[in-house]
Image (cartoon, rainbow, N blue to C red):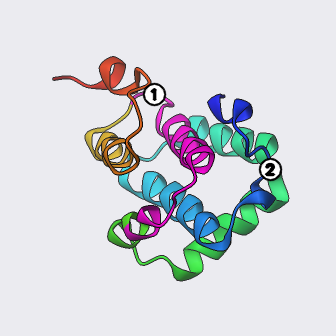
Amino acid sequence: MVYRGSDIINLGDLLLHERLAFGALIGVVLTTGPPGGPAVKQMLEQLAAELGADEFWAIVDEANAVSTGPDHAHELATEVKRRPVQVLIYTAVAELAMPGSICPDEMAVLDELRRLWGLEERGVSSVYRDD
């Protein structure tokens, strides 16, 4: 995963607003896409294991307690300024959206993050988009 090569390896390195953005965006992908079943559950478990399970689930719970939905997640994302954190969040969200295929709502989240943070396309939209 791309975030392994970033300066941020441990979720414990994230600042509070970055933690909330990470968790809220994970929540958005989980609620905007079609029910993922075992593939999404497996990807969640893999992300949690790679990033630190206790910290991962604490962040997701923390964000769920305060996030009010996609608009709030976007607002939180605008506060994430550190490039390594942006890459970590984007990559985690993209990988979570990928089991099976990325639906249009998930693609919209990824497109918005790329625009917001000025990230170069990483081949995700060209592979999964129908246009």
Which residue is depicted at the point 44% across and 47% down? 35
Is 73 rendered above or below residue 90?
Answer: below
Which residue is depicted at the point 40% across and 30% down? 120
Q: Is residue 90 magenta?
A: yes
Between residues 99 and 88, which one lies in front from this camera angle?
Answer: 88
Q: Quadrant of residue 59?
A: bottom right
Is 115 rendered above or below residue 59?
Answer: above
Residue that mark 2 sits on:
10
* 115 left or right, relative to 30: left
Badge 2: residue crowd in 10 Å (few <14, some 14–19, many ≥20): some
N-term mark: 1 or 2 = 2
Q: What element does badge 1 sit on?
A: loop
Which segment did they paint magenta?
75-101
Q: Is residue 73 magenta?
A: no
Circle on res. 126: none
Is 66 rendered above or below residue 105?
Answer: below
Q: What element does badge 2 sit on?
A: loop
Placement of the N terminus among the 4 image quadrants: top right
- What x and y, as percent, mark residue 15? 68, 67
Q: Amino acid at mark 2?
A: Asn
Judged by its main secondary structure, the magenta piece is helix
Between residues 109 and 64, which one lies in front from this camera angle?
Answer: 109
* Mark 1 → mark 2, Cα distance in angstroms: 28 Å
Residue that mark 1 sits on:
100
Between residues 123 and 32, which one lies in front from this camera angle?
Answer: 123
Placement of the C terminus among the 4 image quadrants: top left
| Residue at the limit of the structure toward the bottom, as seen here | 66
Between residues 65 and 34, which one lies in front from this camera angle?
Answer: 65
Q: Amino acid at mark 1?
A: Gly
Determine contact: label 1, label 2, CB under 8 Å. Answer: no
Which residue is depicted at the point 41% across and 37% down? 119
